[in-house]
């Protein structure tokens, strides 16, 4: 699964640049992975494999990484995901999520992380 390195760099850049802001925002609301899963199937499932092993419903031209791969990427963190989901990106549409939906989706993605 290809994860665009420049994107990770961008995510890290924002994570670092905005760290104080996110530090204030992220711990405030613990997202619900269960709600995030249901939401992500609807909102993200056209392009991303939201459930491990399942195919996206309607993959666009550019391949969207499956959420399990995102969860297991070394650079993935709640703050990085937060940064990604509140900043513009090239190929993924800029979906506007409510704060709650965003934190739920982040909780769900991180719940896919393989236990070591
Ligand atoms: C129309 C297709 C589409 C939809 C809908 C979509 N995405 Fe994406 N997403 C992409 C594509 C394509 C990429 C890879 C290119 C990029 O990052 O811009 C991507 C990348 C990502 C990444 C970065 C992965 C990484 O670390 O490189 C995350 C996180 C993500 N999407 C989350 C979501 C979430 C959460 C939703 C639902 C709220 C969603 N996406 C909905 C197409 C989509």
Image: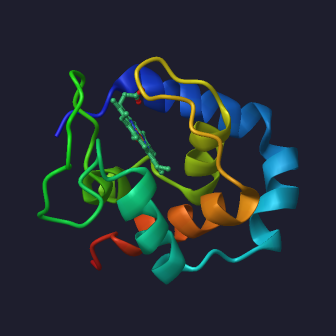
Figure quarter occupied by ligand 1: top left
Which residue corresponds to the image point at 47% horizontal and 82% vertical from the top-left?
34
Which residue corresponds to the image point at 42% horizontal and 64% vertical from the top-left?
109
Point out residue 100 in the picture as x, y percentages from the top left corner: 70, 66
Q: Is 81 positioned to the left or the right of 45 in the image?
A: right
Circle count: 0
| Residue 2 in which image quadrant | top left
User: Which quadrant of the rendered structure holds the C terminus?
Assistant: bottom left
Against 15, residue 103 (above or below) is below
Which residue corresponds to the image point at 22% horizontal and 31% vertical from the top-left?
63
Against 72, residue 63 (above or below) is above
Between 78 and 104, which is closer to the camera in this rendering? 104
Against 11, residue 65 (above or below) is below
Point out residue 62 in the picture as x, y percentages from the top left corner: 24, 23
Query: What colour scheme does the image use?
Result: rainbow
Q: Is 97 positioned to the left or the right of 47 in the image?
A: right
User: Which quadrant of the rendered structure holds the N terminus?
Assistant: top left
| Residue 13 in which image quadrant | top right
Which residue corresponds to the image point at 46% horizontal and 32% vertical from the top-left?
8
Between 112 and 37, which is closer to the camera in this rendering? 37
Point out residue 14 in the picture as x, y percentages from the top left corner: 68, 31
Point out residue 51 in the picture as x, y percentages from the top left corner: 25, 66
């Amino acid at each position: 699964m290809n994860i665009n390195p420049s994107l990770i760099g961008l995510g890290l850049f924002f994570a670092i640049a905005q760290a104080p802001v996110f530090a204030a925002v992220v711990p405030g609301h613990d997202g619900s992975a269960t709600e995030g899963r249901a939401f992500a199937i609807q909102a993200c499932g056209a392009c991303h494999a939201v459930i491990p092993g399942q195919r996206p419903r309607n993959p666009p031209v550019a391949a969207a990484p499956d959420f399990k791969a995102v969860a297991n990427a070394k650079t993935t963190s709640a703050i990085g995901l937060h940064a990604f989901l509140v900043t513009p990106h090239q190929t993924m549409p800029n979906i506007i999520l409510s704060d709650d939906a965003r934190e739920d989706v982040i909780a769900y993605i991180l719940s896919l992380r393989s236990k070591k």
